[in-house]
Image (cartoon, rainbow, N blue to C red):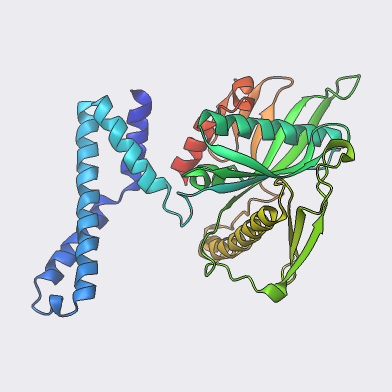
Amino acid sequence: MNDILDRARKILEKIDVDDKKYSASQIEVESTNADFWKNQELATSKMKQLAKLQADINDYELLSDLIKKQDEKGLSDLVKKLENLLYFQGSYDKGPAIVSIHSGQGGVEAMDWANMLYRMYCRYFEKKSWAFEVVEENPGEEAGIKSVTISVNAGFAYGYLKHEAGVHRLVRQSPFNADKLRQTSFALVEVLPIVQEENEVELKDDDLEWDFFRSGGHGGQNVNKVATAVRLKHKPTGITVTASGERYQGKNREYALKMLRAKLWLIFEEEKKKQEESFKGGYKTPGWGNQIRSYVLHPYKMVKDLRTGFETSNTEAVLDGEIDQFIEEELRLS
């Protein structure tokens, strides 16, 4: 009950009900004007806006009443509905996502850490019953992975996962060193939406450079004897993506285009955010310079998110995919 009450109160803090009431009253005054309906399209749009404002106000008042009554069932249903409306307002928040994990410097240690994160996210997807498939995997020479890209085909996948983007830091005793020295490793997580609308990001044929090659597995083993894997370069930006998870070249081409379109969209979005938020003291892009979470396995056990301050000592559960609370805390902060 305490958790649902806390979530409900955070929603109330985010809703500026006085502003909504003022906006609704302004439209109501406008609608009494004799000329209001002369422009049918504008009037209809205004009335839809009024209906949405009134619905939001009613939800706010109902939520306040349910908190006072401590009605757990009523609160649970309404909080879930309002969280979806509040936290998933981005253009692609309700759609699928592309997740990439890249090992940082540190050789086999970092590649093993990237593989641990890969397993963590796969377990998270499984717990949520999300369909996912590997688009591209670049295995490490001794252990782990250099990089992996996963297509997560589920509703709200991007909305839930987008705040996972950034650097994840691991501190542990090295399993690859006989002296078991303490080792710090880094991995970068990228999260992209699947941008369906071609007019959102224009891709000109002359700007694309295609390369086709044979897919390879661990140890250089050939998975395919024909050139089904795809490498796509966007010449104006230099961005290069690869896709080799499918047996057919056409499917890999499709994935490569999706990844390129998503990366370009993200660049445009980051530029907009920089301009909008520069007055707040600077904007951090989710790249190598932005560490978001620390996983300590030695000399003590702790996973801590550096943005929200949320932490847990149950490191085994986190690495087994129990990351819901980290994601929820970040959503509420956003």
191, above or below 328, in the image: below
3, above or below 166, in the image: above
Residue 220 located left or right of residue 84: right
| Closer-to-camera residue (28/204) | 204
Q: Position of residue 16 (x, y in %)?
A: 30, 51
114, above or below 135, in the image: above
x 49%, y 46%: residue: 159
Quarter of the image containing the N terminus?
top left
x 66%, y 33%: residue: 294
Q: Position of residue 230 (x, y in %)?
A: 75, 56
Residue 34 located left or right of residue 74: left
Q: Residue furthest right?
A: 178
x 72%, y 68%: residue: 237
| Closer-to-camera residue (113/278) | 113
Residue 35 located left or right of residue 274: left
| Closer-to-camera residue (316/239) | 239
Q: Position of residue 18 (x, y in %)?
A: 23, 53
Residue 186 located left or right of residue 86: right
User: For residue 319, what is the image quadrant?
Assistant: top right
246, above or below 260, in the image: above
Q: Position of residue 209 (x, y in %)?
A: 76, 68
Residue 297 in sight in this render: yes
